[in-house]
Amino acid sequence: MKDMHDTTPLVLTVAKRLDDRGDIMRLTLTADGPLPEVTAGAHIDLLVDTPEGPLWRQYSLAGDPADRSAWRLGILRDPASRGGSIALHQLVKAGEKVHVEGPRNHFALDHSALKTVLFGGGIGVTPMLAMAWELHAKGADFTLHYCTRSADRMAFADLIETAPFKDRIVVHHDDSAPLDLQAALPAPDAGTHIYVCGPAGYMDWVIQTAENAGHRQKNVHREYFSADVDASGETFEVVAAQSGITVTVGPDETIAKALAREGVKIEVKCEEGICGTCVTDVLEGEIDHRDQFLTEEEREEGEMICACCSRACSDRLVLDI
């Protein structure tokens, strides 16, 4: 089972803000002393004040995991977002305090790998940079493919040019030197692992191509930053076993919202089924998974559900809450 509910409230200082190319804001966060230990692939939950109210949003740590003096984030200003990234770009300034929970890691490296290939599309390069630092420190065999739309949209160029592993990074631009995915993929092998993060279409392309080439599903690791999720569907019942409460989940509401009406709280952050905060154990019933968080193996086990978006295929679900 994934590590899903370990949260550490922190108030950090924005030591530096850098507005990079590609509408990406880079933040350096510090504390009065050493920050908690992290591993590559970890993210933090950042509290964002928006005109519609506070939101929690998840951002991957992009710096060297061994450096506990600061956490480094890259945040894309996405006009199609639900307001979190836009608010941060407008409001965050150097010297301000920010509220953070975490770190949490659902995207950790498998250090038993003999070869690791990283694919980062746009802002999806952030966890890949941390992975490159960790793999380099261990002397591991790896390559990082960083894909952007064009050279003038490429963020983190200064970090890449000075990184001690810069010879392991291959940069691709859609308008001049696009990624040849067939050539970039290594031969399938039990000891070869692939990691991908970026826009959903890019990720689906890499994942499907890798699996079609013969890479085992469990060796192709992914983390979604956002997802277009349809949480609507047929009405069904949810029983909160520990609380002794039964609710009806309507066609246009989620399990979490239906339970909240009756005072049963499930913590929700991303609302898109990507962060894992709301994962709840299922005791009975058939699940209609709508998330991008659980693995296929976990879905087949049918023992967990993302209560922020997933629904029931059966008339009734019994949750261990």
Image: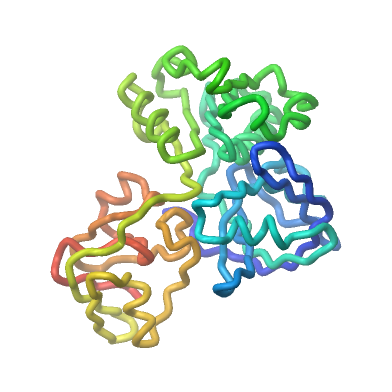
Name the residue rendered at 65%, 19% in the picture: 168
The residue at the point 72 percent across, 46 percent down is 26
Residue located at (22% from left, 70% from top):
251
Judging depth in this view, the residue of 96 and 189 nearest the camera is 96
Instruction: Give the residue displayed 42% in from the left and 28% down from the top.
Output: 206
Q: Is residue 143 above or below residue 50?
A: above
Q: Quadrant of the C terminus?
A: bottom left
In the visual, does 264 lie left or right of 43? left
Farthest residue in the left direction? 315
Q: Where does the image place residue 45, in percent across and percent down from the top left?
A: 60, 60
Above or below: residue 88 compared with residue 123: below
- The quarter in which the N terminus is drawn is bottom left
Which color mode does the image show? rainbow
How many marks on residues? 0
Task: Say if 317 sits above or below 213 in the image.
Answer: below
- Residue 241's image quarter? bottom left
**Residue 245 position within the rendered picture, expressed as x and y whole percent measured from the top left:** 28, 86
Residue 72 spot, x, y in % from top left: 73, 47
Q: Does residue 192 appear left or right of residue 236 in this picture?
A: right
Q: Residue 205's quadrant in the figure? A: top left
Q: Between residues 29 and 157, which one lies in front from this camera angle?
A: 157
Residue lying at the far top of the rendered structure: 183
Q: Where residue 22 sits: x, y (%)?
A: 64, 38
Q: Is residue 203 left or right of residue 320?
A: right
